[in-house]
Image: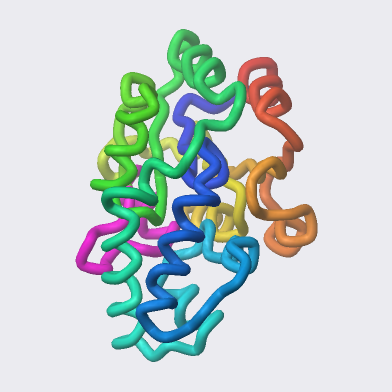
Amino acid sequence: MKYKYILFDLDGTLTDPKVGITKSVKYALNKNNIEVESLDDLIKFIGPPLKESFMEFYSFDEERANKAIEYYREYFKDKGIFENGVYEGIPELLKELKNNGFIIAIATSKPTVFAERIVEHFGLKEYFHIVVGSNLDGTRTSKGEVISCVLEQLNINNLEEFVMIGDRKHDIIGAQENSIDSIGVLYGYGDLEEFQEVSPTYIVDSVNDLYKLIING
């Protein structure tokens, strides 16, 4: 495989954050007097930047969306952050990648401080060269900006050596904005139709298929 630098999305790619994210969103919506019966109705919040989602799915204006994010974090920072689980096979994949000399990074729209706590909590920190996410002040939330920051920090100019791995279209679009390849994974929260709209370099069904693609080429 030609890649040397492997960028991973976090939510829906390395971990399954459904419970924590949806409960945090429900908490924020309750603070806005909006009742949601099923957490499954909030799965659409997994992946995209929160501000974008509150504005798109509930027609919040910018001020109200920013306040909703504050409420979201009230629940998430102590409870929701750990209502999460690592996908089966991911620790083994990361260990194998590191042992084979790959440089591994996280590129997530989640605030960096939360992403760092999550990978440390699940014992994954040792595998990552850097963890880059958004800022708590609401800047650097788009995946394209996050990936750009990763590239700057690694200070590598050969973009052909990079690949971005994620489960939503935002990961693929962000990779394309930075002229690097991408792999869409179908075990997360995106689907084939979503990926077909944005044309990732590769699409895989499982963690095992991802392993085979990267390691074996």
Q: Residue furthest top?
A: 99
Quadrant occupied by the N terminus: top right
In the image, farthest residue toward the left: 137
- Range of residues picked out in magenta: 133-150
Q: Position of residue 25 (x, y in %)?
A: 45, 67
Residue 106's place in the image compared with 176, above or below, is: above
The residue positioned 58% from the left and 43% from the top of the image is 181
Residue 39 vertical placement versus 36 (above, below)? above
Name the foreground residue: 171 vs 52. Answer: 52
The residue lying at 30 percent from left, 70 percent from top is: 71
Task: Give the camera-side residue of 100 and 117.
Answer: 117
- Percent x, y of residue 115: 33, 43
Q: Nearer the viewer, residue 41 or 124?
A: 41
Q: Is residue 179 visible?
A: no
Q: Quadrant of residue 51?
A: bottom left
* Magenta span includes 137: yes
Q: How many marks on residues?
A: 0
Q: Is residue 113 above or below residue 40?
A: above
In the figure, is residue 179 to the left or right of 198? Answer: left
Q: How is the image coloured?
A: rainbow
In the image, what residue occupies the spot 51% across and 38% down? 15
The percent coordinates of residue 16 (x first, y second) are: 55, 42
Q: Quadrant of the C terminus?
A: top right
Residue 66 visible to the viewer? yes
> Which residue lies at the image location 52% right of the left edge and 12% below the top edge?
96
- Left or right for 83, reference 72: right
Where residue 172 sits: x, y (%)? Answer: 58, 54
Magenta residue check for 168: no
Quadrant of the rendered image containing residue 155: top left
